[in-house]
Amino acid sequence: MRSLDESKEILYVIRTLDVLMGSGVGLEAAIHSISQGGYGIISKDFSNLMDNINKGKPLEKELRDLLKKAETDGYKRVINTMLNNVTQNTDIIETLRKQGERMEETRTEAVKEYIEELGGVPETLLSIGMIGPIILSIVGLIPQLMDGGIPGMGNVEQGTIMSVVNMGLFLTLLGMVMIGLKAHTKDPGL
């Protein structure tokens, strides 16, 4: 759950850091701004980081601790970039912009793949949802249309045919639900 929340929010955090620091706000003030909320687990992490800094712990140590807690590569890269800025005074703004662009490209590719995988799902659901009940209703009418019974089977009770039709409708519905779940589980979570 943590990694999903991190991957959802990290690009927004990068863009916010870029805007804040690009306008002259320092790293600690930018972290404080993000800690105020709106970025899920990252806001909570930054809030804990700010609480510990206010208690007198060094920013470098807190960033290192946060780096150990991070689960996704993107979040680890951002924290590592912040850490490098604190320890080596690197150009954090340019690095964040490059990371944001790479992450944006990765997300765009993931969404394209998801759309391609879902391309046939609506047609499949429509086919199953329309054709299945039509075929099953024809099966239900066969005993009424045939006076001498079904060739090779003889007379089949109406109750038996209705049981087959009802089971078929249930299986059609179950198949549609399973296809929908399959599509839902492939959601890239962005």
Image (cartoon, helix red, strand yellow):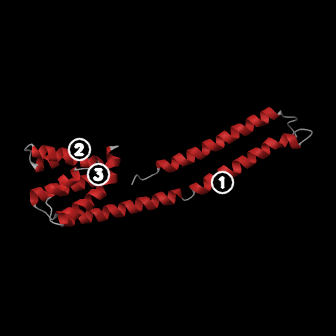
Nearest to N terminus: mark 3 or mark 1: 3
Name the amino acid type tagged 2.
Lys
Give the quarter of the image for residue 33: bottom left
Q: Residue at x 17, y 63 (%)?
A: 92
Q: In this rendering, does residue 174 appear at all?
A: yes
Residue 182 in the figure: left or right of residue 50:
right
Local SS, label 1: helix
Q: Residue at x 60, y 46 (%)?
A: 176
Residue 115 % position (x, y): 49, 59
Q: Residues within 10 Å of mark 1 (few under 14, many from 20)?
A: few
Q: Quadrant of residue 173?
A: top right
* Residue designated by label 3: 39
Instruction: Residue 59 in the image: state x and y as whole percent.
Output: 11, 50
User: Which quadrant of the figure contains the C terminus?
Assistant: bottom left
| View extreme (front): residue | 36
Residue labelled with disc 2: 69
Screen quadrant of the N terminus: top left
Residue identifier under label 1 = 127
